[in-house]
Amino acid sequence: AHRGQRSLSYMGHLRMMAAAQPFLSGAISKTVNMPETATVDEIMHTYVEGWRLGLKAIAIYRDGSKRSAPLNTKKTKDMGGAMAEAAEKSLDVMVERPELRNRILELEEELNSLRGKPTRHRMPDTRMSLTHKFEIAGHEGYITVGLFEDGQPGELFIQMSKEGSTIGGLMDTVATLTSLSLQYGVPLDSMVRKFAYQRFEPSGFTKNPDIRNATSITDYVFRWLGCQFIPGYKEATSPHRAQAELPMKEIPEMEKKAVNRPVADLPRTAEKEVLDVITNHVSNDGASAVIANGSSNGHTHADRVKEALGGMFMDTTCSHCGSEKVIRAGACGVCTECGTSQGCS
């Protein structure tokens, strides 16, 4: 070993491994560290010496052979004296100015207490708020959201009609936990994804056109928060969200006028083709029979199409989003709003 360097020579590594090799059945997983100045002949000599000592395998690492390394045996400038001198100077300053020493100790304690501790952003004493009245299957309640200066939610209050009831106490707990989470920086969209569509009673239809059906009070509260404060959430989940426009062929002016005329005035072949292509629901025989009998009763073509499309939907609502646009697909019902399948075994 080199004096004062606290390191072993590479031959010392070999002899240490050779002392333990007779007691092991396999090779020793030990790296032989060689300095950066090692030559090819020295590396070859190391392998030969390992074979002579009875080692089954050795692995050599030459310092500096990789771009980065956790250890480095290269000699650097001794900085111990400079660091000791700087420490002595700082100690002298602290002795001469005890108030500075006390302040440093206080700051260190404060830093240690804050390290790894989440920060709570409290609401201002006077703040704006937003109140919303809701009703789920006859159960009325109020949602009040306190806002930060930037308009983001910072606290939540849920007031049910029956004070002191079990559901009222649970909603108070949910509101308190939500308020603390918002003030400690938990993203609102994370909570909405977690608590939306939770299912428990009371549940049912609501008067909110954006949330037609709620699976629970928690579901309604967080979906409403998403509609109010998360950009794009309302457009993505509302039953009345806009649908993408399909490319339509330009219709001549004469055909536009013909479409708005009563069905009895349309040619039989044109009426049959329009109903078959657009609705894809009324049978050819049925459409021809209606036209042949002249039983249009003054209904326009648009009314006939609407009636035909209405027959495609089932008399049920989606169990996931509450939409009434559930069509039959074989033995199942498929929601055209969210794609949820129901009624399948």
Image: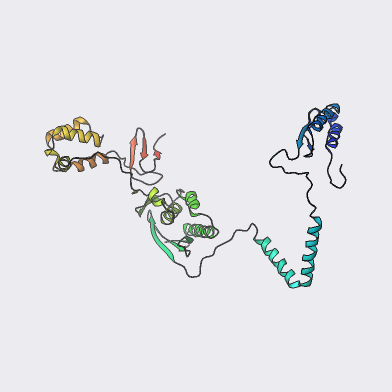
* x and y, in percent, of residue 333 in the image: 36, 38
Q: Nearer the viewer, residue 284 or 17?
A: 17
Residue sitting at 80 percent across and 53 percent down? 78
The image shows residue 90, relative to residue 275, as above or below, that is: below
- Does 74 sit left or right of 170 as displayed? right
In which image quadrant can residue 273 be found? top left
**Residue 162 visible in image:** no
How does the figure colour the protein chain or chains?
rainbow
Q: Residue at x 78, y 62 (%)?
A: 86
Q: Percent x, y for residue 280?
A: 26, 34
The image position of residue 21, as x and y in percent, is: 84, 30
Above-or-below relation of 178 to 276:
below
Q: Is residue 58 left or right of residue 121?
A: right
Q: Classify residue 295 as left or right of residue 205.
A: left
Residue 252 figure quarter: top left
Q: Quadrant of the C terminus?
A: top left
| Residue 3 visible from this viewpoint | yes
How many callouts does the rendering have?
A: 0
Assign the N terminus to one quadrant of the image.
top right
Percent across and percent down for residue 237 are: 39, 48
Residue at x-position 79% and y-position 34%: 39
- Out of 36 and 16, give the one closest to the viewer: 36
Q: Quadrant of residue 60?
A: top right
